[in-house]
Every structure is written in C-alpha cells, then in structure tokens.
Amino acid sequence: MRTQQGFAEVNGTRLYYESAGEGLSVVLIHGFSLDTRMWDDQFEPLAGKFQVIRYDMRGFGRSALPDGAPFSPVSDLEALLDRLGIVQASLVGLSKGGMVALDFSLAHPQRVRSLALLDTVLGGFDWSREGSARNDLVWQLAGSVGLQAARESWLAHPYFEPALRQPQVAKRLAQFVAEYSGWHFLNDDHEQGLEPPAARRLAELRMPLLVLIGELDVQDFRQIADLIHRQVPHSRLEVIPDAGHMSNMEAPAQVNALLLDFLWGMGTA
C-alpha cells in the first residue's frame, strides 16, 4: 500500500504525518510519550477502506519540540487538517490522543464526522490520589535523578503492566519510550487545554461516539470511560477483554474489528 509521508509547517511548528488509502478521512492520534508507530496494527487495515492519517503531535516522534511558547494541540490538529485539505474527519485517539480528539470535537464539532476514544484521558477529570501520585513520581525522578530514571519509571507505570506481559508489545513499547525525547519530563509545558474542560461539556457532543476501554486498565481510566458513556447517551461503550491501557496494541484484532464496524457504519449511514 502506498503511504505518503511528509512534514507540515503549521502554527510555527513542524508536524510529521503519514497518509494512506482513499475515501472518508480518519485521523489516528497517539498517546503520551508515543508516536505514529503505536498505530502500526491499525494503519493499513483501516486504510483499506478509508483515507487514514496519523501524525506525531508537537513534542513527540519526528515532530518539532515545543519552543516554550503557549500552544494548543487542538489548534495544531486544525491547522494540519487545513494543510491537508480535509474538511471533515473521523477522529480516533488513545489516552492523551483521545483527550485531543475529544477537545477538538467540542471546539470544532462541524469538522468531526465521528469520534472513537480508546482508554482516553478526559480534561477536567478528578484523578484519584493514587493515580496522581504515581504520575508525579515520574516527573520527580526526572528532576532529581535524570531522564533515564524517568523513562524507566514511566515504562514501569501500572498503565503498561498488562501490555508488558506480551513480549512483542513490550519490546515495541520499550523502544517507543526509549526514543521519546523526554522533553515534557524536563521542561515546563505551556500546552493549552480546552476551557471549560471537556468533563464539563460532554453533553454537547452530538457526533457518533465509540468508547473503548481495556478490561485491565487502571481504575481512573475505567471511570472516565463510564463517565463519558453515562453523560453521552448515544455513545457506545465496548470493553476489550484481557487488555490494559494500550488496548490497540494488546488486542489489535478486537480493536480493529470494532473500529472498522463503527467507522464503516458512519461512512454508509
């Protein structure tokens, strides 16, 4: 399958992207410390039916690092779609990528045909004390011990525990985290989120919505999935058996089947 690769100069930054396939547009948005490669198991299967775009967000993968000025991932995505001539797309995001997809859908609902959220972060969600403390540990280690210690702590996070039980998935994750710049661990992040945050605006969502959650994901993310499903009555919630936070990598066959069914249904509706 022919894949177009390139860099888009937008919003004063440089975003790496890949595109393959034809038809309705689907955009895949990666999680924190990851990049386009986390979608390797989805990219070609989806591109058999759609035009699929995956890109590295600012600060990740092959895209440029933040320069210290305030920026918005939602504005970056808007500028990338404009640059590629895409008026409307279905968005698929995991974890941090899900948060960006959700925020974009609230900020620009007319540009989103459908929305699929995998083990998503939710802006404005009240994280558990345990979850916040475990996340903070990574940044504390970065400042007191160094980047390598932060990377090791991040990879050992309970988020990834189920994925690390699969040798091939563990190998890929270790590579992604090792090659992540670590910029966010060492610098003040001036990323601007949606205001008011998405947790207070879920009732505004009108586009078709699929919520996927790994059965073994941590409690905070399972609560987020339930919260979104409760507050968006037309949403569809699917639990991926025996999968954790990296559900698309841990259970690609199940996730691909659900995404294809959902996205194809939107395309033929």
Image (cartoon, helix red, strand yellow):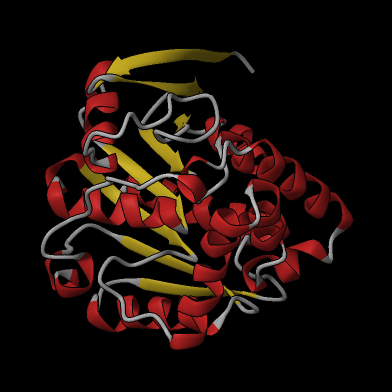
Tell me: 17 left or right of 105. Answer: right
Total count of labels: 0
When the figure is inspected, residue 161 is found, relative to residue 103, above or below; the finding is: below
Asked whether, in this view, residue 157 is left or right of residue 194, the answer is right
| Residue drawn at (62%, 79%) of the image | 215
Name which residue lies at 22% across and 57% down.
207
For the point 68% across and 41% down, which residue is it?
Answer: 176
For the N terminus, the quadrant is top right
> x and y percent of residue 17 in the render?
46, 23
The structure residue drawn at horizontal position 46% and vertical position 77%, both measured from the top left corner, is 132
Residue nearer the viewer, 184 or 75: 184
Q: Does 183 sit left or right of 81 as displayed?
A: right
Instruction: Determine if residue 210 is in view.
Output: yes
Q: Position of residue 68 (x, y in %)?
A: 30, 34
The residue lying toward the viewer, choosing from 139 and 36, is: 139
Residue 169 in the image: x percent, y percent? 78, 52
Residue 262, quarter of picture: bottom left
Residue 74 appears in which quarter of the rendering? top left
Q: Is residue 253 visible?
A: no
Q: Residue furthest front?
A: 144
> Where does residue 38 sit, x and y in percent of width and height?
62, 43
